[in-house]
Amino acid sequence: MLSSKERAAELGREGERRVAEYLRRKGYIILRRNWRDSRFGEIDIIAENRENIVFVEVKTRSGDAIVSGVQAIDRKKVYRTKNAAMVFMRKLNTDLPPRIDVAEVTVIKNSDNKQIWKLNYIKSAM
């Protein structure tokens, strides 16, 4: 049996997988997943489209969560994400401008106890 921490990590991984698939269907190329900078932390998904290099913070929650995914992003997370994105951009040779998006994934159970996944994708969220 999984601990609550393990269940949350599993839920987060599935949310990230679903967001990556959503982006692919929209024509994005996934450059990296779970890219980590030693100083500023992790960026969940880094993708590219014709206009931008897109850094995506994915927040996955169950339907009964007290705080929504967007509400869970505090000033410290914004600061760390922006700085990690700048570090990545310095290493990438591109003329495309960066953009930071947030993907809020919520999973709820319907009356048949089946999971329903909902995505709220916010461009230029940070």
Image: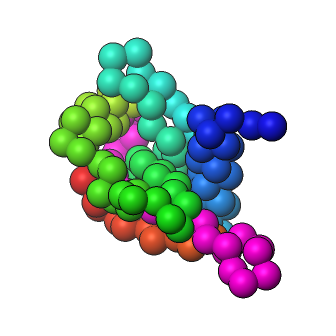
Which residues are drawn in magenta? 89-116
**As drawn, 95 above or below 27:** above
**As drawn, 66 above or below 39:** below
Residue 98 appears in the figure: yes
Residue furthest to the top in view is: 38
Of residue 68 and residue 98, the one placed in the foreground of this image is 68
Seen at 46% across and 53% down, the residue is 59
Q: Is residue 113 magenta?
A: yes
Q: In the rendered view of the protein, which quadrant contains the N terminus?
A: top right
Seen at 42% across and 48% down, the residue is 57
Q: How is the image coloured?
A: rainbow
Q: Position of residue 20 (x, y in %)?
A: 62, 55
Q: Position of residue 63 (x, y in %)?
A: 53, 67
Q: Is residue 16 magenta?
A: no
Q: Quadrant of residue 86?
A: top left
Seen at 22% across and 35% down, the residue is 76
Q: Position of residue 99 (x, y in %)?
A: 32, 53
Of residue 118 and residue 18, the one placed in the foreground of this image is 118
Of residue 85 and residue 8, the one placed in the foreground of this image is 8
